[in-house]
Amino acid sequence: MSTDAATTGSRTTRLLGLVVLVGVLALILLGFFGAPEDDEQRDAVRMIFVHVPSAFLTYTAFLTTAVGSVMWLWKRSRWWDIVAHSAAEMGVIFCGLTLFTGSVWGRPTWNTYWDWGDVRIVTNLILFLMMVGYLALRAAGGDENAVATRAAVVGLLAAVNLPIINRSVEWWANRTLHQKSSLTDGNLEDLTLFTLFVGVVVWALFFVWAMIHRFRIGWLEHQLSSIDLEAALVQRRAEATGESAEEANL
Amino acid sequence: MSIVALRDAVVLLGRFPALSGVDLEVGASEVVLLQGPNGAGKSTLLRLCAGLLRPHSGRSVVLGHDLSKSRAAVRRSVGLLGHDTALYDDLTVTENLQFLARASRIELTAVGSALERLGVSARLHDVVVGRLSAGQRRRVALAGVALRRPELWLLDEPHAGLDQGGRDLVDGLVSEAAADGATVLVASHELDRTLELKTRRVTIAGGTIIADVADSDAADTDAADSDVADSDAADSDVADSDAADSDAADSDAVDTDVAGVAGGRGS
Amino acid sequence: MLADVWLVTHKDLRIEWRSRVTLSQVVPFALTVLVLFGFALDANRGVLNAATSGLFWLTVLFVTVVAVTRSTAIETSDGACRALLLAGIEPSAVFFGKTLAVAVQILGVEILMVGGVLVFYGATVESLPLLLATCAVATVGIAASGTLLGALVAGVRARETVLPVLLLPVLAPVLIAASRAFDDALGVLAVDGWSWLGLLAGFGVVNAALGTLAYGQLLEEA
């Protein structure tokens, strides 16, 4: 493979990237200038254009990691392993974004950065910590297959425990401050709702775009290790004859 | 039926090809001596045959089981003595072997006889393994292998750290196992000793087999000498051939040798 | 299967009996943590009393990390886990066996810790059955997820540091549920402690099931 062929871009991703760029611009315009101030939350309401989509994408990424983990353990599919890893990285970013925007929004609205009584945000934090652990395990390195298997089990462990964590936090908090009703009880202006919809679509497209690139990086790394393997095999066999690898290659 | 049948077997440790394409056929009740420099891949080959490693590519069949599919079945029927002794420091000699026996569904009475066979004196039976000397510990580990009466013995430097008596015991154990119809693969630097056994000598280097010769008769030193010459010839064969083609050249050489061994045994 | 589970449990407990690592190291560690919490909270009886349940179970989580590290080390030192593989014991039997052994040891530490909080924090037991049931159910779940993750990190280079990063977030629901159940058992809060036991049991079942499925693959990669 020549070096200039090793790119994560393609016509599709470039087009998609362009759409995302336009979408983000539109979202900024709509979010800051189009959507009106909320009666109670004032300008802070604009935070939901990031907060809600990233919360949604956190769970999408998380679910993707869980599916990828199952597929690795079941079929030992490298493709799914890389998907699981890519999604986990995306998940940590979006989960972090969810927590950050949630805290910033919480300050003016609930008068606190952090509220232990909020089930979703507390669950999200534990999820965040688990996924950070997942990435730490990946980063610890080792045999490619072993790393994939270990990471897959952690991915599944997080997935099966998430409902339990959510339930425990819910019972514990006993009450929730979260805006359960914001989207459904008609509190939000039509334009705000529309902007939120645009936000979800734009962020989802960004998610897909970034996932494709991240996946291709993983795939290229995997291919590179396969190329390395060929060279390593030649070099290893050359040890048998006492030649150095360079001589063997000639 | 071949006990071990490897064809272009590649094993990766991380990204390092510890085995870079091994072709090896070993029949029942053969004793194969694996030799080669440090880091040649001898231990990896033994661990592959034990069903502890997943082959990356090639075809690896041991005791009729494909190693890329069912390693658990292989593990149950082999005995492996590795560099580490796989014993629990805080259990006594007897407790360690009784645990192994129970786990492997073997009569507990076999423990006593296995220890006796390896010359582990009765006063050591109730000593925790952590307090044994390296040599005593190795004897206990060997007793653990003998206890299982495996179909395939995989011994990695079994003589290491043993006194003269211990070394003789190992040789006797290997001879007995082969006489019982078991197959033995021994990785060893102790060429002189193992020459006393009826063996086939496989030289491994760079994760691949570069020579495979039969000692037609253990007592016949002339034959042994000419075998060494043979192995040199095989060596230069590989050197001459292109590295990429060396696989094919190698496997041909091995095939001939295997046929030779089979013929020799038949006659 | 059951015989193999018992074989592994018996082996681990016998090793503990010989080496007394839990008794001579983990127990003093647990009591030290409890005492240090007392210093951290300025020996304020009121605060300590209110926080007893949480501090107790937080200490149990620390104990779990230490106990699981030890349980894993038994198998990784001198390649003993290879012997388990070669012996042909079902990996799920090894998982349950080691889980049970870890659970027994943690339970032992917990019982001594209950004595600790009675003395140092001035706690009083209002419902002994609830207290014991909470310890039993919570500990099985803790031991199951700990044993699974112990095998998981066995082959990792920085295993001592990776284990707590992975294990502690997973144990968060146990901390919540067991602490609330203890609040009731110790008469600190008027909550229905028994209702939390279902959650603890669910945690145990889910993690034991995953361990049964995944342990074999992890043992092979170690």
Image (cartoon, coloured by chain):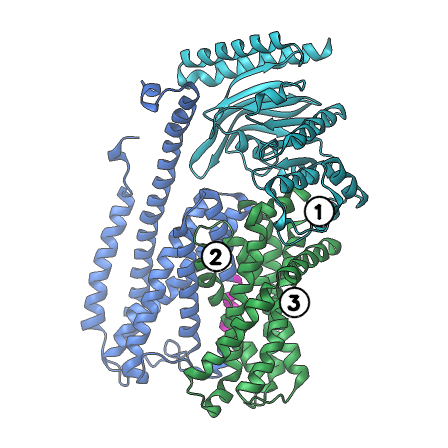
Tint of chain A: blue
Main SS class of the magenta portion in the image: helix
Q: CA distance from mark 2 to mark 1?
A: 47 Å
Relative to B122, is A171 above or below? below
Q: Nearer the viewer, mark 2 or mark 1?
A: 1
Q: Is residue C100 magenta?
A: no
Q: Are marks 3 and 2 in contact (CB under 8 Å)?
A: no
Q: Quadrant of residue C5?
A: bottom right
Q: Nearer the viewer, mark 3 or mark 1?
A: 1
Residue at point 60%, 11% (across, down): B224
Residue B257's disc number: none
Residue at point 56%, 7% (across, down): B226
Circle 3 sits in a helix, a strand or a loop, which is it? helix
Tint of chain B: cyan
Q: Nearer the viewer, mark 3 or mark 2?
A: 3
Q: Are marks 3 and 2 on the same chain?
A: no
Q: Are marks 2 and 1 in contact (CB under 8 Å)?
A: no
Residues in magenta, as a range: A160-167
Tint of chain C: green
Residue to which mark 1 is pinned: B124
Residue A155's disc number: 2
Q: CA distance from mark 3 to mark 2?
A: 28 Å
Residue C104's disc number: 3
Q: Are marks 2 and 1 on the same chain?
A: no
A71 sits to left or right of A31: right
